[in-house]
Amino acid sequence: MENIFEMGCLIQLSSSAWGARRKIKTEQITDLAGANEWLSTHKKLIDPCALKPICKVVNAARSYLSGMSLPFPINGMVFVPKEMISRVDEELDRFKSDFDSEVEEFISRYDGLREVALVYLGDLFDETDYPVDIRSKFSFAWRFIVLDVPNGKSGLLAPEVYEREKAKFVQTMEEARELAIVSLREEFSGMIKRVTERFTNGNDTKTKVFKNGTINNFYEFFETFKERNIFRDSELAELVSQAEAILGGKTAETIRSNDQLKEQIKNEMAEVEKSMEDILSRPRRRIVMN
């Protein structure tokens, strides 16, 4: 059995934010509800736009973590290779700082937002809907976790329970291995397709534009691939190297402005895409690794 916790650990990112909504009692719903954008079967306690900057930070943090980790068969947890743990921890600390700043900004506007709500909600405004300690409704935290085979020598578990839990652990390790391999393959395949689509004419016969983000996402993937490829998927590694060589560090602007270069990348990336499709079409049990 390959214990992946010799190669990294789990991370659990959790966050919470005030919902700023409250269900309206049936007897309170009037004909006015349909004409007021703040009212439906729920009432908005403040302008939802006021919370968007906070949610934006959380979404950015989760997106970052997704790009630096591998999926794991336990809800709410992802696996981070050991070489990336410090980097991820430092970056999440920066996200937390941004989160805290946005929360403080929201708190500074809280009283004013309630005054606006009073105007829009009218008789449905209820002071008790608004937390006195609004800061307590926001949180952003993460923790690192390492799992291990249950200790059968401790005497805490009956032999049959120990064997059952040990079998579960082995199964979890195998599921994590397969998830990690398939996830990286599908992520890379999706990126290849987005690039090759740039050469495909749409319904309006205009060639789609190479966006900076499309190319930059590739370079970000190249930067973290070796650390994330913890199960040494040699077939995928070869195709990633090919794609990296094809792009050769060129920017989207350079590609857009050079028709000959675009044609070259188009043909070479199409070959990578075909190879990737062949790999993904195989049964998962035929995954080949070093």
Image (cartoon, rainbow, N blue to C red):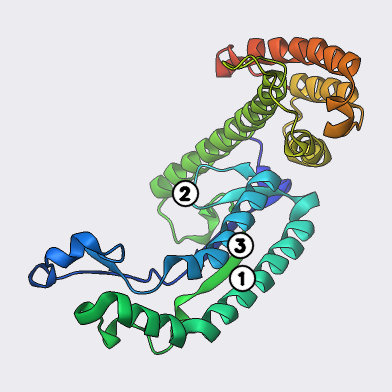
Q: Within the image, what quadrant is residue 255 found in?
A: top right
Residue type, mark 2 in image: Asn
Q: 22 or 285, which lies in front?
A: 22
Q: Earlier in the sequence, mark 3 or mark 1?
A: 3
Left or right: 254 with respect to 88? right
Q: Position of residue 48 (x, y in %)?
A: 43, 66
Q: Which residue position is annotated with label 1? A: 99
Horizontal arrangement in the rendering, residue 128 relative to residue 231 (left or right): left
Question: Considering depth in this image, is 147 or 98 the residue closer to the camera?
Answer: 98
At label 2, counting other C-alpha atoms closer than 10 Å, the crowd grade (few under 14, some 14-19, many 20 or more) is few
Tell me if label 2 and label 3 are in contact, CB under 8 Å.
Answer: no
- Quarter of the picture holding the C terminus: top right
Locate residue 201: give its quadrant.
top right
Residue 191 in the image: state x and y as whole percent. 69, 28
**Distance from Cα at disc 3 to Cα at disc 1:** 6 Å
Q: Residues within 10 Å of mark 1 (few under 14, many from 20)?
A: many
Residue to which mark 2 is pinned: 75
Query: How far apart in space, not on screen, are marks 2 and 3 (Cα)?
Result: 21 Å
Residue 146, labelled with which disc? Answer: none
Q: Nearer the viewer, mark 2 or mark 1?
A: 1
Q: In the current view of this chain or complex, which residue is farthest to the left? A: 27
For the image, the number of numbered tags is 3
Which of the two labelled residues, at mark 2 and mark 3, occupies the earlier sequence position? 3
Q: Report if residue 126 is visible in the image.
A: yes
Picture quarter containing residue 230?
A: top right
Local crowd at mark 3 within 10 Å, few (<14), some, or many (≥20)? some
Instruction: Give the label on residue 57, or none.
Output: 3
